[in-house]
Amino acid sequence: MIPVNEPLLNGNEQKYLKECIDTGWISSEGPFVEQFEEKMAAAVGRRHGIAVCNGTAALELAVAALDLQPGDEVVMPTFTIISCAAALVRRGCVPVLVDSDPLTWNLDVEKLRSKLEDEIEVKQNRRIKAIMVVHIYGLPVDMDPVLELAERYELQIIEDAAEMHGQTYKGRPCGSYGALSTFSFYPNKLVTTGEGGMVLTDDDALAVRCRSLRNLCFRAEKRFVHEELGYNFRITNLQAALGLAQLERLEECVARKRRIGRTYTELLGGVDGLEFMPQETSYAENLFWVYGLVLKDEVSFDAEEAMRRLKRQGLGSRPFFWPMHEQPVFRKMRIFSEERFPVAERLARRGFYLPSGMALTQGQMEEVAGAVKNLMNEG
């Protein structure tokens, strides 16, 4: 079986982990945590990094740090991982959804513009407080119009850059936008800590608040007397050591991901029935965090069937995100109305991604491409 992801751990990972074990610094108080935070913040041009136990925790911390209140609304894409909406719902906030761009699969900025104009200018809805930007699969959201809209309507931006390590928008690092940005360090990311995440900000006060919320809101003068409920979202020195070693090779990892994307595109370019994400846009070269495919409408089977057939050939694959407005848990909670988002719905049903991990070899890519060609020839 060729797995959908396999991390590459061939740098200083063992060296740094051995140092943790030799010194006994294995908890969140070890020195690698601060080093990792500083290096990651520098990599994206931020002043502060606050490392946490996973990317979901990073989103929840960001929402809490902005002090969004129950009933406040946050505009976000429907096509994303559930962590984004869950962070808002757990806070009592209301996600306001926007459909995807059919070419980049990201939040459609023109639909975002229409949503804000309708809700704020026409309906005078001042409950909208923020925009959650989520970069999807390898290409960033077109940020300039988002920034313009946020300024016009006085909205905060939370930037979810979980999949965008090393990616840029018009030369500026993803993860450097908005009041707060977040990353994930799950094993399928370009930088992994096994499990882990980070919140980044340029705001000194927000950084202090995030550090307090991450650590149960302990107080320096009376540690176990709490004025506010926080979270135990700490990352360990062991995880940070792994992340620091990974971060040292970020440029190499970015180049490797783009090489994987180019190779797959060359191998599959002439196959009928497939839609591909662009190699580049006017504002960014594709990072190809994962290599996604969308089955054209004339193909008789859907993504679920395609993945079943690939599995029989010994290949791992993964479905695309399922839209937030169609999530059973949110339907039970009656959070969303009967809105339809046809682009996201189509992506969810006809999209999947191929083995895309950092350890993928040329031979494995050729084998995967051959299996996909067989799949499409079967009809």
Image (spheres, rainbow, N blue to C red):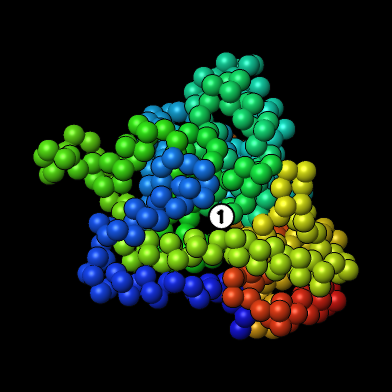
Residue at the spot 44% in from the left edge and 40% down from the top edge: 47
Mark 1 neighbour class, 10 Å CA radius: few under 14, some 14 to 19, many 20 or more: many
Between 332 and 351, the residue placed more toward the observer is 351
Residue at the spot 72% in from the left edge and 52% down from the top edge: 285
Q: Amino acid at mark 1?
A: His
Looking at the picture, does residue 350 appear above or below residue 5?
above
Looking at the picture, does residue 323 appear above or below residue 68?
below
State left or right for residue 45 relative to residue 206.
right
State left or right for residue 210 relative to residue 77.
left
Residue at the spot 66% in from the left edge and 63% down from the top edge: 255
Between 194 and 247, the residue placed more toward the observer is 247
| Residue 146: quarter of image | top right
The answer to whether residue 334 shows anywhere in this view is no
| Residue 90, image x, y percentages | 39, 42
| Residue 26: quarter of image | bottom left
Q: Quadrant of the N terminus?
A: bottom right
| Residue 215, image x, y percentages | 26, 47
| Residue 293, image x, y percentages | 74, 62
Residue at the spot 51% in from the left edge and 19% down from the top edge: 126
State left or right for residue 65 relative to residue 106.
left
Disc 1 is placed on an element classified as loop
Q: Which residue is mark 1?
A: 165
The total of numbered circles placed on residues is 1
The answer to whether residue 139 shows anywhere in this view is yes
State left or right for residue 63 relative to residue 362.
left
| Residue 259, image x, y percentages | 71, 67
Q: Quadrant of the C terminus?
A: bottom right
Between 323 and 81, the residue placed more toward the observer is 81
